[in-house]
Each structure stands twice: as C-alpha cells, then as structure tokens.
Image: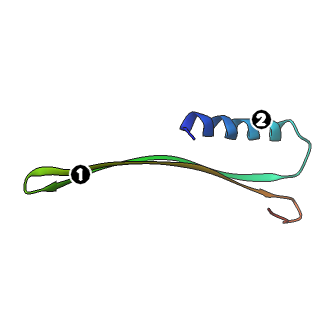
Amino acid sequence: MEQKDIRKIVEDIARKKAGEESNAYFIIRAESRREWGMRLANGHFDRVTTAWDSGIGIQAFTDEGASG
C-alpha cells in the first residue's frame, strides 16, 4: 500500500465521520516507511538492501467508552 492510498483511506473515513450525527471517535494510525542499507567489507560494497513497509490501524470509541 502506497502513501497516497493510505491518505485516501484516512480522508474517506474523516469525510464520512464529518457527515454523521454519531458520537463516535476514531484514532487512525497510518504509516508508510522505506529503508535503505549498505554494508561495506574491506572498502567495497558487500550488500545493498532496501525494505518497504506500510499499514493502517483504526480504533473506534463511543461516548460510553466502548471501543473496538
């Protein structure tokens, strides 16, 4: 999942919440991360690595304190 996809999901949830008359609250955690690594051995590149990770988590609460 790319950062623009995560952003669209978060915006859709916020837009839907703004149009509702409910007393629900949301905590939305979204992350998109890319890592690069290089290993040198005796002055030469031994290994070059890349990693990419992304995800989203949503937690909902009511005024009564119920969550899920």
40 vs 24, nearest the viewer: 40
Residue identified by numbered label 2: 15
What is the three-letter code of the residue carrying label 1? Arg
Q: Which mark is residue 20?
A: none
On the picture, is 51 further left or further right than 3? left
Residue identified by numbered label 1: 47
Of helix, strand and loop, which one carries label 2? helix
**Which is more foreground, mark 1 or mark 2?**
1
Instruction: Specify few, some or many for label 1: CA neighbours under 10 Å numbering under 14, 14-19, or 20 or more.
Output: few
Residue farthest along the bottom direction in this orientation: 65
Instruction: Specify few, some or many for label 2: CA neighbours under 10 Å numbering under 14, 14-19, or 20 or more.
Output: few
Residue 46's x, y, as percent?
18, 53
Q: Residue at x 61, y 36 (%)?
A: 5
Residue farthest along the right direction in this orientation: 21
Of helix, strand and loop, which one carries label 1? strand
Residue 19's x, y, as percent?
86, 35
Residue 45's x, y, as percent?
16, 49
What is the three-letter code of the residue carrying label 2? Arg
How far is mark 1 from mark 2, CA to CA? Answer: 45 Å
- Quadrant of the rendering where the N terminus is positioned: top right
On the picture, is 38 further left or further right than 54? left
Q: Residue at x 79, y 62 (%)?
A: 68
**Which of marks 2 and 1 precedes in the sequence?**
2
On the picture, is 17 further left or further right than 41? right
33 vs 23, nearest the viewer: 33
